[in-house]
Image: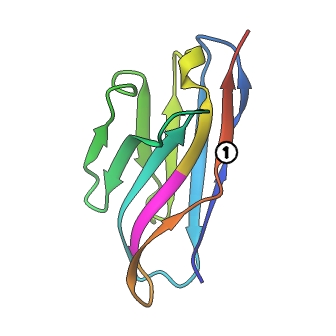
């Protein structure tokens, strides 16, 4: 059974920083890509950032220049460093992985709340 467990959310003032982590565990043979999504109240879930197994990164428009996605050497933990946070970054942040377990499938974490407020 595969699990994605996020951590690092919380309350931060505008202009501050947070670092989210997502650890994938279980019977994993290969991770093709890991992503961070976010969903604010009343809005659709949006892609924030992606990192592939080759290390290629890409970002949604809201994250460019402020957020950085990275991963550990084993490739099973992904991070999202968020700087210069704005109130509009307030959302539940979800980790997602496209990976090979018994089958290739899409997996989601439970989400972590990020609140940017003074």
> Can you identify the residue that label 1 sits on?
112
Question: Magenta segment, principal secondary structure?
Answer: strand
Quarter of the picture containing the N terminus is bottom right
Quarter of the picture containing the C terminus is top right
Q: Nearer the viewer, residue 100 or 41?
A: 41
Q: Residue furthest front?
A: 42
Residue 102 lies left or right of residue 14; in this view the side is left
Q: Residue at x 40, y 76 (%)?
A: 105
Is residue 8 visible in this depiction of the protein? Answer: no
Q: Position of residue 57 (x, y in %)?
A: 29, 44
Q: Residue at x 49, y 68 (%)?
A: 107
Is 13 in the magenta? no
Q: Check the image and report above or below for 107 versus 93.
A: below
Q: Position of residue 88 (x, y in %)?
A: 54, 19
Q: Check the image and report above or below for 35 versus 10.
A: below
Is residue 5 visible in this depiction of the protein? Answer: yes
Residue 26 lies left or right of residue 74; in this view the side is right
Q: Check the image and report above or below for 96 versus 27.
A: above
Q: Check the image and report above or below for 107 versus 26.
A: above
Per the rendered image, the range of residues in magenta is 95-99
Q: Position of residue 100 (x, y in %)?
A: 39, 80
Q: Nearer the viewer, residue 111 or 57?
A: 111
When asked about the image quadrant of residue 8, the answer is top right
Label 1, secondary structure: give it: strand
Q: Nearer the viewer, residue 13 or 68?
A: 13
When asked about the image quadrant of residue 66, the answer is top left
Q: Residue at x 74, y 25 (%)?
A: 11
Q: Residue at x 56, y 49 (%)?
A: 94
């Amino acid at each position: 059974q595969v699990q994605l467990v996020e951590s690092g959310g919380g309350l931060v003032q505008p202009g501050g920083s947070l670092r989210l982590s997502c650890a994938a565990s279980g019977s994993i043979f290969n991770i093709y890509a890991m992503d961070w999504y976010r969903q604010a109240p009343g809005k659709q879930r949006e892609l924030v950032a992606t990192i592939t197994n080759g290390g290629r990164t890409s970002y949604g428009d809201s994250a460019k220049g402020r957020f950085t996605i990275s991963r550990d050497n084993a490739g099973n933990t992904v991070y999202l460093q968020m700087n210069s946070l704005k109130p509009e970054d307030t959302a539940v942040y979800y980790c997602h992985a496209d990976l090979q377990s018994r089958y290739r499938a899409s997996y989601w974490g439970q989400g972590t709340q990020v609140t940017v407020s003074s």
